[in-house]
Image (cartoon, rainbow, N blue to C red):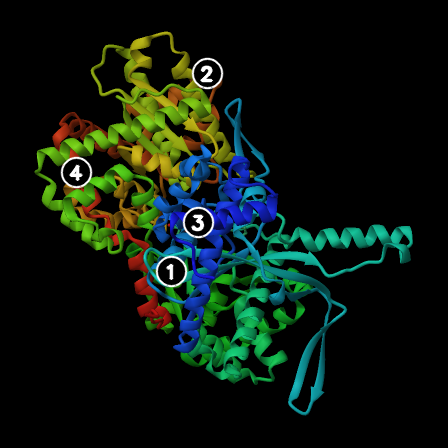
Amino acid sequence: MATATTSKELKEAINGKLSRYFGVSLAEATKEQIYKAVVMTVRDILLEKRNAFHYKTKAAKGKRVYYLCMEVLLGRSLKNNVYNLGIGDALTGALGATGVTLDELYESEPDAGLGNGGLGRLAACFMDALATGNYPAMGYSIRYEYGLFKQKIVDGWQTELPDVWLPGGEVWLTQRSDMTVRVKFDGKVEEKWTENGMKASLENCTEVEAIPYDMMISGKDSDAVSVLRLWAAKSVRNFDMNSFSEGDYMRCMQEDNEAELISKVLYPSDNHSEGKSLRLKQQYFLVSATLQNIVNEHVRRYGDLHTLPDKAAIHINDTHPALCIPELMRILMDEHGFGWDEAWDIVKKTVAYTNHTVMSEALEKWNEDLIERRLPRIYAIIKEINQRFCAEMWNKFTGDWDKIERMSILSHGVVRMANLSVVGSKSVNGVSALHSEIIKNSIFKDFHDAYPDMFTNVTNGIAHRRWLCQSNVELTELLKECIGDGFIKDASVLSRFKDFANDKTVLMKMSEIKRLKKEQLCSYILSDMGIKVDPDSLFDVQAKRLHEYKRQLLNAMHIIRIYNALKEDPDLEMQPKTFIFAAKAAPGYYMAKRIIKLICSLSEDLRKNPNAKIRNKLSVVYLENYSVTMAERLMPASEISEQISTAGKEASGTGNMKFMINGAITVGTLDGANVEMKEQVGDDNIFIFGMTAREVEDMWKHGYDATAFYNNNPVLQSVIASLKAGFNGESFADMANYLLTGSPVADPYMCMADFNSYLDIHKKADEVYADKEKWNKMAVYNVAGSGYFSADRSIKEYAEKIWDLKSIR
Ligand code: 26Q
């Protein structure tokens, strides 16, 4: 069957799906049925494309990259695939007189929210860029039944509801039962001597079936299609109810449940690691199923595993899939008869690791006992890896016990996953220039001393077609008029937009487009939350996970400062402003939830303020249930992008790039990728404030004194006083204490230290905003400078520097 691409062919294909699966014709079908039929049709096109590309890769004996990640935050897929395949017009034609538009179908797709934030969204952006670059790639993750919780704000507090995405989302998934594998937990290691030496196997273990579900992700005008393989856990038991006594029946049901619990729900914490047994099971489940799959396919294709490093690059996205190092050792030794040294050589040439954080609470440490009990064979292998590694270090740094202790994988009863990841990989990279420097001098300093060449940087990037071309069609059209459409495939072309920085018509159009996107956001907020927002006010936006280090609190302190000034003088002349927040907090993260409560109370308090003069100049909106789809609406409507983490804490940030490409101006610290954004746009086109990472380090080392800032600053004193007095009838004295006297330390992310500088930079931003032409010019420079932050560029660097991966033409 040839691929359907004309209106007529698409209509036939859609009708075929409708009649086969729902027994209706296009004219009779409901919107939901049409949505499903359209998705199935697009999915078929992609499956066919993928097969063709697969054969090409096979013929070329090409190397493939396997990207392992515990989360993939896809959002919606239909619009992206239709855009990439260039079949929008044909589909609109096919839908013809049904009365259902393509846009309505896009809107009926639920977000696949199988991730928390940056790390998971990065994986999704990379799948897109890999396909566009014609790289043979597979992503591997878990088919969670429930993605990241749905956030409801009740009385200013976040509450969590389950995210049911599969009804509606499952049409993208193709079950591949033929590739089902089994994953083993618990049990006891039995060692047997055979003619090929000692063989280890697990006895009395629990087995769980891993069933793969494939999702196709298209590239833009390319041959390749990335495959995202999501594993679902299923109990292996096929029980015969009659033969069970009641007690056994209940026990079996419970075991059944436990097996399937593994892929039930995504852990909702971000940049925080909890050593929970179920999470460990999830990680091993992903890793073991994936490696069995990779090894089986390699053996089928090439017959021999010695060539694995030439044909496969296995990438671990943070330490979460780091068990793939001992798991590959296990498969090579226990199932394929390799000796230790040979197996280790293969692992070290195949695996590469990206670090995404330096914060100690996010570094994964598992209790040795837990790993020993749940994964006894893996535990034995980790011990052996560690013993050999420590011996090697002893030869390198003889006598330096402290150093070897710091580098050891096992220490004080825990397994340090970051150390395991470095020891078992060929390459370690950070995700922005600054972050990659920091890891060499902090968490991985000892490793860097030993193996300096292992360390490199690949600055993150975003799927610019999703974040610009699809979510901001109006700006995209303007860009096409000015610089042609080359930027769609090659984002570096965006730099040509600089030439239009003095073109008055273009500047005018920039501001018209921003205004339109703001209006669109306003109607969305009105219909979704019933809140009226003034599109004439400046939109100042902070949208990202809620975390102390990201400092939503500093933002709130600034708002309180403005509020106080307005209370003192309601006639104060100022640009009316709307501060927009969107963020989910980990359900167990009290301080994050408290910050949400503060922002919501502030928002309510302002809304209820009897003085219209104040209300008209200042408002705060907390958008409920931040998601990929919401971000796609929000970024194009933003004027100020808040990227205000304590310097040294945000590995990269990727939201910053999404705002920038939509012409928002960044108010930010010199942290993560902000540093490189400043280089790309020039110092005059970004508002940088606050301490540098080094200054933060130094101040911390010399003992940070929050009260000193307080004592010297009447404005800060008034903000603290307002927190104590409270908003909307609730005191936030606890937050005041957190900032001033908190224990073990007050103000751990140094909001107080950066407060003045933050106010100053906002003042500067205000001045520029008053000069519309200047502001629009800055916006032009931001769009023009954003090309570097395309995921296409990041992926090219990974392919060249780390994976030695060639695109298949
Ligand atoms: C670990 C163990 C147990 C449970 C959960 C976790 C866990 C889950 C998610 C730990 C961390 C994460 C997510 C981290 C994350 O999103 N990091 C962000 O990665 C982005 C992409 O590189 C960067 O841009 C951000 O700076 C970084 O914070």
Q: Residue at 60%, 66% (x, y): give it.
A: 179
Q: From mark 4 to mark 1, how far is it between C-alphas?
A: 33 Å
Looking at the rendering, which quadrant does residue 752 occupy? top left
Name the secondary structure under disc 3: helix
Disc 2: which residue = 728
Q: Which amino acid type is shown beneath numbered disc 4? A: Met
Name the secondary structure under disc 4: helix
Residues packed near mark 1 inside 10 Å, few (<14), some (14 to 19) or many (20 plus): many
Disc 4: which residue = 778
Q: From mark 1 to mark 3, how far is it between C-alphas?
A: 23 Å
Q: Nearer the viewer, mark 4 or mark 1?
A: 1
Disc 3: which residue = 10
Residues packed near mark 4 inside 10 Å, few (<14), some (14 to 19) or many (20 plus): many
Could you tell which of marks 4 and 3 lies nearer the N-terminus? 3
Q: Nearer the viewer, mark 1 or mark 3?
A: 3
Q: From mark 1 to mark 2, how far is it between C-alphas?
A: 51 Å
Residue 72 versus residue 50: which sits nearer the camera? 50
